[in-house]
Amino acid sequence: MPRWLLAVIAIVVAGLGAAALWVSLAPTTSECPGAVAGSGEFELGGGFELTDETGARVTEAEVLDGPALIYFGYTFCPDFCPNDAAMMAATVDILAEKGVKVRPLFVSIDPERDSPEVLAEWTDFFHPNMIGLTGSAEDIARITKSFRVYYAKPASQNDADDYLMDHSTLTYLIDRNGVVKAFFRNGDDPRQVADSVACHIAEGM
């Protein structure tokens, strides 16, 4: 059994409050839950170039064929990441029952350990349509900056083989250009998330 299923040590997630506050301040005209602005100085997300779970270099144009849910985490994460990946998978299945297609994406903030092969095994466990994305440290720094994602390896873990990462835990709804239209928090109910996603799609995102 993969070691990430056996881990029971809780990690300290720093920066979530600041990230959520920044996003919540963004003005929006949408009436859908979780909406954020998608233009001007408050725009989040955008184009990217990363390595997918097959080892191929891909851009947002090659990965996104419509709306998607995207999460930033790592496969060695003992609690938040598995929970949020499961939430994404459940949301996607709920939407599929309504005839709405949404792609789940998982971007690793730990490229040192999360090889394409590791990501493929991890994402396939949660959903057959989930795509794992990784890249160089520079690639990850670039995309996390555009999404305002916090992540860090605590100094106290520098010499540890089984180190844990601090990171924010927002799941973003993005359009086919990678621009964020809404965000959801750890612990949100998949059916409520699905309702929000469907609302945004109905608005023509």
Image: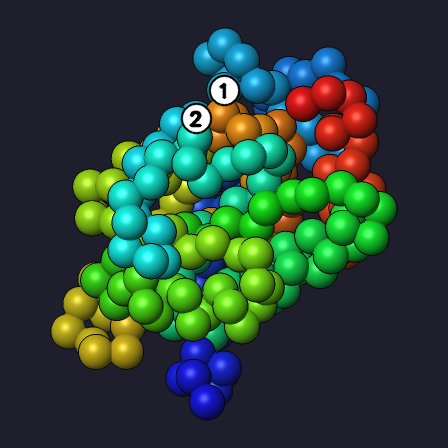
- In the rendered view, does 135 fall on the left or right side of 173? left
Front residue of 22/62: it is 62
- Residue occupied by mark 1: 43
Q: Position of residue 197 (x, y in %)?
A: 73, 38
* Label 1 secondary element: loop
Instruction: Locate residue 140, reporting x and y percent.
Output: 29, 44
Residue under circle 2?
Answer: 46
For the residues bearing labels 2 and 1, Cβ distance under 8 angstroms? yes
Where disc 2 sits, the SS reads loop
- Gap in Å between the C-alphas at discs 2 and 1? 8 Å
Q: Residue at x 65, y 59 (%)?
A: 89
Say if residue 49 shows up in the picture: yes
Q: Nearer the viewer, residue 140 or 169?
A: 140
Three-letter amino acid code of the residue under disc 1: Glu
Left or right of residue 139, residue 181 in this image? right
Q: Position of residue 9 (x, y in %)?
A: 45, 80
Q: Is residue 203 left or right of residue 139?
A: right
